[in-house]
Amino acid sequence: MHNKTILVTGANAGIGKETALGLAKLGATVVMLCRDQPRGESAQQDIKQQSRNDRVELMLCDLASQNSIRKFADEFKSRYQRLDVLVNNAGVVLRKRSLTEDGLESTFAINHLGYFLLTSLLLDLLKKSGPSRVVNVSSAAHHYAKLTVNSWPTASNYSAFGAYANSKLANVLFTYELARRLEGTGVTVNCLHPGGVSTNLFRGLPKFLQAAIKLVASSPEKGAKTSIYLASSPEVEGITGKYFARCRQQESSAASHNIGAAKSLWTLSEELTGLIPSEREAGAAS
């Protein structure tokens, strides 16, 4: 992975931190996208020390804010001439319904629209750097989602798990649709279930549920293995539009293969993020 530049979102803790660490150990230049500067700097130092790789950079972005994502994308492209791998990892589980500054339900906005907008804005750089990869961290929770795409941005009938499951189905639908659109460009797109992992993702849930999850969950290090595999392994070179778990292709839900829903979600996402024509063209197949 020497001479490769990799961007990992949510890289200050949990699976994201372990993914960044694993890729840094392989010799890549790793850019950590984090929201909190002190936590990001602490994780950055840990990763540098453990990997013995000084090419670990920190950049700040709030994925709940479309304005912040746009500023980040502009700054990233001004700093870096290439992007070999984008790992969309950051995600939340929110106990109570809330809205972002853009007026969207927060779980959907962060877990799906964050992936969608960031990837769209960096696609031109990914294409220039090809062959390159996009890796989207989803979850087996997507099997329990309700395929009601138009209600996801508001989630007026809110439940923490329901909103999370819907956002993870959105990740898979986005992966498959993006893979179709990028066929022949040299950019591959795959998604994954990291396994049941004990991370800060569940910090908003009641204490007794957090304790129960920890009893059965595996470590973030194990959870990061499939992300690292998809980002770096020659075994998956050229493979696109697939869903993985435990470093193997798996079958995703029937709903995730609904092409009409994927196209509807894509159109809705363009509208909600306000992608302008030139940005949409960057995501179109060359």
Image (cartoon, rainbow, N blue to C red):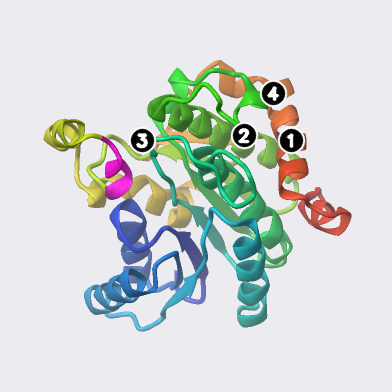
The amino acid at mark 2 is Pro
Mark closest to the chain's N terminus, 2 or 4: 2
Residue 130 vertical position relative to residue 161 in the rendered view, above or below: below
Foreground disc of the pair 1, 4: 1
Write down the residue under mark 1. 268
Residue 226, image x, y percentages: 37, 45
Q: How far apart are marks 2 and 1 (CA)?
A: 9 Å
Label 4, secondary structure: give it: helix
Write down the residue under mark 2. 153
- Asked if residue 238 shows in the view, the reply is no
Left/right placement of residue 14 relative to residue 119 reads left
The amino acid at mark 3 is Arg
Label 2, secondary structure: give it: loop
Which class describes the residues within 10 Å of circle 1: few (<14), some (14-19), or many (20+)?
some
Q: Residue 249: say if magenta.
A: no
Residue 214, image x, y percentages: 15, 38
Mark closest to the chain's N terminus, 2 or 1: 2
- Asked if residue 120 shows in the view, the reply is yes
Which class describes the residues within 10 Å of circle 3: few (<14), some (14-19), or many (20+)?
some
**Tags 4 and 3 touching, CB below 8 Å:** no
Label 1, secondary structure: give it: helix
The amino acid at mark 4 is Ala
Bounds of the magenta segment: 200-205
Q: Distance between the residues labelled 2 and 4?
A: 14 Å
Mark closest to the chain's N terminus, 2 or 3: 3
**Tags 2 and 1 touching, CB below 8 Å:** yes
Write down the residue under mark 4. 261
Foreground disc of the pair 1, 3: 3
Q: How far apart are marks 1 and 4 (CA)?
A: 10 Å
Q: Residue 95 carries which label?
A: 3
Foreground disc of the pair 4, 3: 3
